[in-house]
């Protein structure tokens, strides 16, 4: 997937991590490997993948490179939301984060004017509370208490999204108006929820500055996109971020609405059953950092699955195009051995103008429940047509549709549109 010319930089990263981090030296030695053994891409695949568990257990002493501490200049600390289990503490250099972000934004022409010389964009974040670095779930903190050192305003939201009280929603809308942001960084399901409330209250979400929107944290469903675009209008540049708190921007959506992965700042592999996949075949993303002096990662298994498309994009970017499939632990596992990804489920649902929100949940028996919050225009035939599509795609698993007024979030505070207790248990 990545440019073969990057492999020299990969070998340098391996040597650096081996010499400077306790964890990776042990990881190599436990597998009978030394940096000089890695000469080719085939040799590289002899290194067993590393995982969040390694970095969770080793943080900070075993994974920070020699000469660095968490208080070193330009070090930014992060904590993940805990989507895949326990929350992960990590750190990143501010300039590495900025470089990776710039590469991502570079594929979308709508973001060209966001950063101007001598200016800093004003950011508002509306995302699950576990994705924030301040207390924002209760709603009782002040706006000043929720402004991060980089100037980002973190808006309040309840830990359980649909349980957010009206006064807290009004507070978020008021704060966007008062803060006058250039950029909204949002969880798409959360922001679609906010647009539904704003419409109900007769409010707008706007700024005297040119607004941009970055989506992240969870799958950007077609249902959420449809609601956001209808409410915000066609002039709003929207970019869906492929990213992780510990790594920053791994990719971004271009102005042609295709997702590109960042093979400039990372060496990326898409792997299935221990081998690299072919274009059109889905695989798990493995990430190797390039020139990361703080926490170098080698063959870092993300748990996120993609299908590399192997085709050029009309936007003009040379960064590879992928289709997002979703987390491996969220894939629906069928009795015949097939798996259906969250991305495939979302394609089956489509933009569905008749519903506001959905969640497909597979229980431990293999049966699936599709719960949805119907919109004002819902008709019985809409649900019947969707049920037929889901039953055909998920057979021989049983599927049950249910219209509801409430669907809970995950323990992490995220709202996942597709979850599987079978896949999650199998990953433990």
Image (cartoon, rainbow, N blue to C red):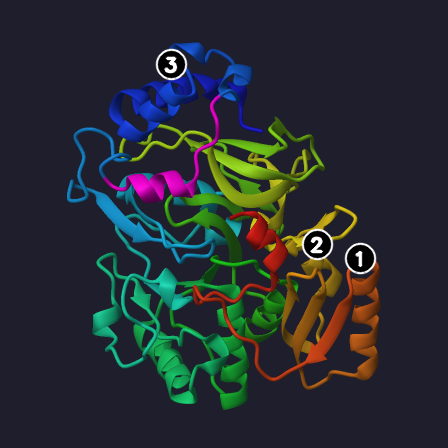
| Camera-side residue of 109 and 249 | 249
Note whether 2 is above or below 40 in the view shown.
below
Distance of label 2 from label 1 (alpha carbons): 9 Å
Q: State the SS at label 3.
A: loop
Q: Quadrant of the N terminus?
A: top right
> In x, y percent, where is residue 244?
43, 48
Highlighted magenta segment, given as a residue range: 47-60
Distance of label 2 from label 3 (alpha carbons): 41 Å
Residue hosting label 3: 34
Question: In which quadrant of the rendered view does residue 133 lie?
Answer: bottom left
Distance of label 3 from label 1 (alpha carbons): 47 Å
> In x, y percent, where is residue 211?
44, 65
Viewer-side label of 2, 1: 1
Mark nearer the N terminus (2 vs 3) = 3
Residue hosting label 2: 344
Q: Is residue 26 visible?
A: yes
| Camera-side residue of 334 and 16 | 334
2 and 1 marks in contact (CB < 8 Å): yes
Residue hosting label 1: 393
Q: Residue at x 54, y 72 (%)?
A: 192
> In x, y percent, where is residue 92?
29, 42
Note whether 225 is above or below 290 in the view shown.
below
> In x, y percent, where is residue 31?
43, 20
Viewer-side label of 2, 3: 3
Q: State the SS at label 2.
A: helix
Question: In which quadrant of the rendered view does residue 127 lie?
Answer: bottom left
């Amino acid at each position: 997937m990545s440019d073969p010319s990057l492999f020299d930089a990969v070998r340098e990263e391996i040597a650096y991590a081996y010499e400077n981090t306790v964890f990776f030296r042990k990881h190599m030695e436990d597998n009978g490997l030394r940096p000089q053994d890695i000469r080719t891409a085939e040799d590289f695949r002899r290194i067993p993948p590393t995982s969040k568990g390694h970095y969770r257990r080793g943080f900070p002493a075993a994974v920070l490179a020699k000469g660095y501490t968490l208080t070193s200049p330009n070090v930014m600390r992060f904590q993940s939301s805990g989507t895949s289990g326990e929350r992960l503490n990590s750190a990143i250099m501010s300039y590495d984060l900025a470089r990776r972000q710039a590469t991502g934004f570079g594929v979308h022409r709508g973001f060209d004017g966001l950063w101007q010389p001598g200016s800093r964009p004003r950011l508002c974040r509306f995302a699950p509370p576990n994705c924030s670095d301040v207390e924002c779930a209760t709603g009782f903190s002040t706006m000043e208490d929720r402004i991060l050192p980089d100037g980002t305003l973190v808006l309040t939201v309840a830990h359980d999204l649909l349980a957010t009280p009206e006064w807290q929603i009004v507070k978020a809308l008021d704060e966007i108006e008062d803060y006058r942001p250039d950029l909204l960084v949002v969880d798409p399901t959360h922001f679609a929820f906010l647009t539904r409330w704003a419409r109900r209250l007769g409010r707008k979400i706007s700024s005297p500055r040119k607004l941009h929107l970055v989506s992240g944290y969870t799958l950007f469903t077609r249902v959420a996109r449809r609601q956001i675009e209808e409410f915000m209008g066609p002039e709003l540049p929207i970019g869906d971020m492929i990213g992780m708190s510990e790594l920053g921007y791994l990719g971004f959506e271009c102005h042609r609405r295709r997702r590109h992965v960042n093979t400039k700042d990372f060496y990326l592999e898409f792997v299935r059953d221990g081998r690299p996949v072919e274009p059109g075949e889905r695989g798990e993303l493995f990430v190797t950092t390039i020139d990361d002096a703080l926490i170098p990662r080698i063959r870092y298994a993300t748990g996120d699955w993609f299908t590399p498309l192997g085709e050029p994009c009309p936007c003009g970017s040379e960064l590879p195009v992928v289709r997002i499939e979703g987390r491996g632990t969220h894939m629906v596992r069928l009795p015949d051995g097939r798996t259906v990804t969250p991305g495939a489920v979302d394609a089956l649902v489509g933009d569905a103008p008749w519903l506001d929100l959905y969640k497909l949940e597979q229980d431990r028996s293999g049966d699936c429940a599709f719960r949805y919050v119907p919109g004002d225009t819902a008709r019985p035939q809409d649900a019947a047509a969707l049920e037929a599509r889901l039953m055909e795609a998920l057979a021989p698993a049983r599927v049950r549709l249910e219209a509801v007024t409430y669907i809970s979030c995950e323990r992490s505070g995220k709202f996942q549109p597709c979850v599987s207790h079978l896949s999650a248990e199998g990953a433990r």
